[in-house]
């Protein structure tokens, strides 16, 4: 790529990153998981390692064991990559929210650059197409929406794109100095990816398959799985050494999974009230289109220009040892998508807290479809002229104007309807419930138990235990230990000063009142504080709320 095109890519990356900075000018959007990431980052900075300083509400453990381990509970489902990046940002003097913004801005720049580089490798004589693809990815509703969150999604997506680019470079330039650089970049990206997102382990089988396809050497191909599998294995050992465990579940519900996939995959095309037959038709059409594009990508050299021939020879590898640019794309991108979807689907069937099918988790697939579509359009323009390409581009632009992909589906979790709305008004961070602010002012001698431990830590850095849930995990299955956990909570409350904070949940409030028999109940905005057991013996440990509910 010439210096001029590099400048254009830099402008596109800077524009996408600026959009991120503008939409998060009021602070990033924090979700429940944000508190976990913030807690791990804080523990990393304080020398406690990649542990969580509170008991999480979604994945609670044994109350007594977790109480004894506070503030260093094992981080079973949250890898340390993103928290480590946050810790670095905070170490430079940035606040919690600004550190999250900085990581996302950097990730957006990296994503745009990696997508441009990968597309250029696939279409060496079409730098303009590479820039267009990078711009589309940088301003996709999903990528821009992910960039507004205090979450690991955008960082994982950027590392995925870097791994794709490095793998393509390695296939083309193996045996050269540039190939050695590609190996180093791939290793860093692969390790970073699996330590940022558990599903990143899909890179291992994809890399092995594509390397064998290019080199016909299993042992060389197997080496590409070492960074990913090694990092995943090391992280599992760290979790186990800290007392964590990963429990597999044999609970299989293919009907529910199929229904979830159908609803999520068609939310971009059909209204939430659309009948099932319409959703099935739309999903079938989308799958056919994806199959056509993927088939084009993995096709033979016929129909593709030979403009990549000289680049491959100059890279030190003879053309007969490598697939064409189209096969490179098919081998790298399609293989990863298949492996990634396989990992996500398998987790839904066999892992108790499986990875959900939603726009966040399917973001790598969306980026892959954009890149695959670029290759398909390039081939179409070569075979049928620029008129077809111009017609398709016009159709896509018109489609975006009428919004058939329902970009509000990507923005719904941050309270906005589109990228334009977020740019004009900014994302408004969710206010921390007032009841948690009251709990944060309690003396350190008081143990806080709440149904919002993640928000309590994100807003006030206060450790807490989680109120037992009647339903366990992401699946909403009945918690078989619920009654015993309530009994354990009652014992803890009687043994040490404890305040139970219930936020926005009257059912839980009534249940705990019957079970704990509190001596004092304070109603405040957004919640209720229950004082029971040992704390009742000392009035000084029960300060009145400064803003009681009316």
Image (cartoon, rainbow, N blue to C red):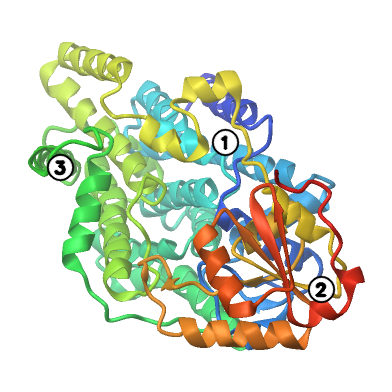
Q: Disc number at residue 266?
A: none
Q: Quadrant of the C terminus?
A: top right
Q: Can you identify the residue that label 1 sits on? A: 109
How packed mark 1 is, by other alpha carbons closer than 10 Å (few <14, some 14-19, many 20 or more), is many
Q: Is residue 89 above or below residue 137?
A: below
- Judging from the image, what secondary structure is the residue with disc 3 in? helix
Residue positioned 75% across, 49% down in the render: 89
Element type where label 2 sits in the image: loop
Residue beneath disc 2: 446
Q: Measured along the vertical axis of the image, is residue 280 above or below residue 269? A: below
Q: Of tags 3 and 1, which is closer to the observer? A: 3
Place of residue 104 in the rendered image (x, y in percent of width and height, measured from the top left): 60, 41
- The residue nearer to you, when weighing 21 against 331, is 21
- Whole-percent x, y for residue 443 in the image: 87, 68
438 displayed left or right of 185: right
Alpha carbons under labels 2 and 1: distance apart: 45 Å
| Residue 186 located left or right of residue 270 | right
Contact flag, marks 3 and 1 (Cβ < 8 Å):
no
Residue 506: % across, % down: 53, 58
Going from the N terminus, do you reach mark 2 or mark 1 first?
1
In the picture, the disc for residue 283 is 3
Query: What x and y, as percent, mark residue 378?
Result: 23, 27
**Which quadrant holds residue 462?**
bottom right
Q: Nearer the viewer, residue 32 or 470?
A: 470
* Marks 2 and 1 close (CB-CB < 8 Å): no
Q: Earlier in the sequence, mark 3 or mark 1?
A: 1
Secondary structure beneath dot 1 equals: helix
Q: Quadrant of residue 494?
A: bottom right
């Amino acid at each position: 790529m010439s210096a001029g095109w590099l400048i254009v890519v830099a402008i596109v990356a800077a524009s996408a990153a600026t959009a991120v900075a503008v939409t998060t000018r009021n602070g990033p959007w924090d979700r429940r998981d944000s508190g976990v990431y913030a807690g791990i980052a804080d523990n990393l900075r304080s020398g406690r390692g990649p542990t969580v300083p509170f008991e999480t509400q979604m994945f609670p453990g044994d109350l007594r064991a977790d109480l004894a381990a506070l503030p260093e509970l094992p981080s079973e489902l949250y890898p340390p990559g993103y928290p480590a990046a946050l810790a670095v940002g905070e170490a430079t003097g940035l606040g919690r929210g600004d550190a999250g913004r900085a990581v996302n801005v950097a990730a957006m720049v990296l994503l745009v650059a990696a997508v441009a580089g990968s597309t250029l490798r696939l279409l060496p004589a079409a730098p303009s197409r590479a820039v267009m693809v990078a711009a589309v990815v940088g301003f996709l509703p999903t990528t821009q929406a992910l960039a507004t969150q205090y979450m690991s999604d955008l960082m994982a997506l950027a590392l995925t794109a870097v791994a794709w680019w490095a793998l393509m470079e390695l296939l083309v330039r193996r045996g050269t100095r540039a190939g050695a650089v590609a190996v180093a970049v791939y290793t860093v990206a692969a390790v970073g990816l699996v330590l940022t997102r558990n599903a990143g382990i899909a890179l291992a089988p994809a890399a092995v398959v594509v390397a064998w396809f290019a080199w016909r050497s299993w042992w060389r191909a197997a080496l590409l799985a070492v960074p990913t599998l090694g990092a995943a294995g090391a992280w599992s050992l760290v979790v186990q050494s800290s007392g964590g465990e990963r429990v597999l579940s044999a609970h299989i519900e293919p009907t529910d999974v199929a229904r979830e996939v159908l609803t999520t995959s068609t939310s971009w095309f059909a209204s939430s009230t659309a009948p099932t037959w319409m959703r099935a038709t739309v999903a079938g059409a989308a799958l056919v289109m994806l199959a056509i594009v993927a088939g084009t990508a993995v096709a033979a050299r016929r129909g593709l220009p030979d403009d990549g021939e000289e680049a491959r020879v100059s890279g030190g590898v003879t053309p007969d040892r490598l697939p064409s640019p189209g096969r490179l794309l098919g081998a790298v991108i399609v293989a990863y998508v298949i492996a990634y979807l396989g990992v996500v689907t398998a987790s839904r069937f066999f892992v108790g807290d499986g990875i959900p099918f939603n726009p966040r988790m399917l973001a790598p697939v969306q980026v892959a479809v954009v890149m695959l579509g670029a290759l398909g359009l390039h081939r179409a323009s070569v075979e049928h002229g620029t008129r077809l390409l111009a017609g398709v581009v016009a159709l896509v632009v018109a489609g975006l104007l009428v919004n058939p992909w329902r970009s509000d589906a990507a923005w719904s979790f941050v309270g906005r309807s589109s990228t334009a709305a977020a740019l004009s008004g900014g994302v408004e961070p969710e206010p921390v419930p007032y009841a948690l602010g009251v709990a944060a002012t309690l003396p350190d001698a008081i143990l806080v138990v709440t149904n919002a431990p993640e928000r309590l830590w994100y807003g006030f850095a206060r450790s807490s235990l989680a109120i037992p849930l009647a339903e366990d995990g992401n699946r909403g299955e009945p918690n078989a230990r619920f009654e015993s956990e309530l009994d354990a909570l009652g014992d803890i409350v009687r043994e040490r000063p404890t305040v139970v904070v219930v936020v926005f949940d009257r059912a839980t409030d009534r249940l705990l009142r019957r079970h704990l028999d509190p001596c004092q109940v304070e109603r405040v905005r957004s919640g209720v504080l229950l004082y029971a057991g040992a704390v009742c013996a000392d009035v000084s440990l029960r300060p009145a709320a400064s803003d009681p509910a009316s």
